[in-house]
Image: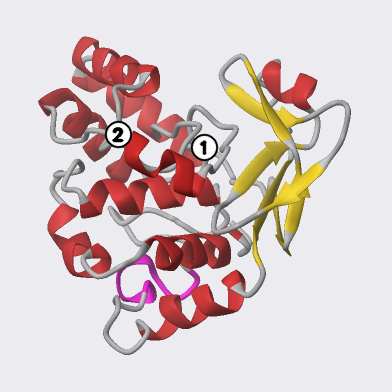
Amino acid sequence: MDASRTCGPAAHATAWKAPAVRKNASLAGLSATYITQQMADYKSGMRKFAGPQRSPSVLMTAIAKAANDAEIEAAAAYFSSLKPKPTIRVVETDTVPATEIARVFYITKKDGGTEPIGQRIVEVPVNAEQFEHRDSRSQFMAYVPKGSIARGEALAKTGGAGITLACATCHGEDLKGIASIPRIAGRSPSYLVRQLYDFQQHARQGSLSALMAPVVEKLTHDDMISLAAYVASLSP
């Protein structure tokens, strides 16, 4: 729920330059309890975005406020019944295809070219036309800095000597969620970074946000990228 093209606020856009292609994240397989709670958080104003105002966040808030309890419960039951499918290939690299904006998402430039990846995530659809037509079978490439996956695995599994907490503590051994705690395995890495940043900036203040406080408090920009790279590389 609620993803955007860029990770973090405008102040970080130049440093991160993280082209995420999805305006919204997949709901398939998330628990009905989690989905229902997120709708309640949007409705109450407890779930916000830490960066500049974004249309997906505004739209989600409007939808949540307009929906009644029965509609929310029915939608939550439907989405939770769907089986999540692997759609992301995470690739470590020093260089990435040059990108450009196509309306509201990024694609690789048609005339080719490459550029250094730096410390960022570059996430683009394999087939831009397929994605633009909202095909649920669309596949994505997520380019991350070399070494990100191993470093992220260490942080996710051990907490990195006090930097954070082991993800399995709340999200389960396979990171596929437990009850109201959502699945994070196999989700969009750019989406994951944005959520970590939103928690760190206290933009997300829902019922479970207190559990995330010690997780995100000490995370650096590079920590977030590494965690997201590893988690996104897992099977959903």
Question: Mark 1 — residue?
Answer: 26
Asked if the stretch drawn in magenta spans residue 151, the answer is no
Q: Earlier in the sequence, mark 2 or mark 1?
A: 1
Q: Amino acid at mark 1?
A: Ser
Residue 39 in percent (x, y) is at: 25, 30
Q: Quadrant of residue 157?
A: bottom left
| Magenta span of residues | 167-174
| Image height of 79 relative to 131, above or below | below
Q: Amino acid at mark 2?
A: Gly
Q: Residue at x 27, y 46 (%)?
A: 198
- For the N terminus, which image quadrant? top left
Residue 101 in percent (x, y) is at: 64, 23
The label on residue 62 is: none
Question: Mark 2 — residue?
Answer: 51
- For the C terminus, which image quadrant? bottom right
* Inter-mark Cα distance, 2 to 1: 21 Å
Q: Residue at x 15, y 44 (%)?
A: 206
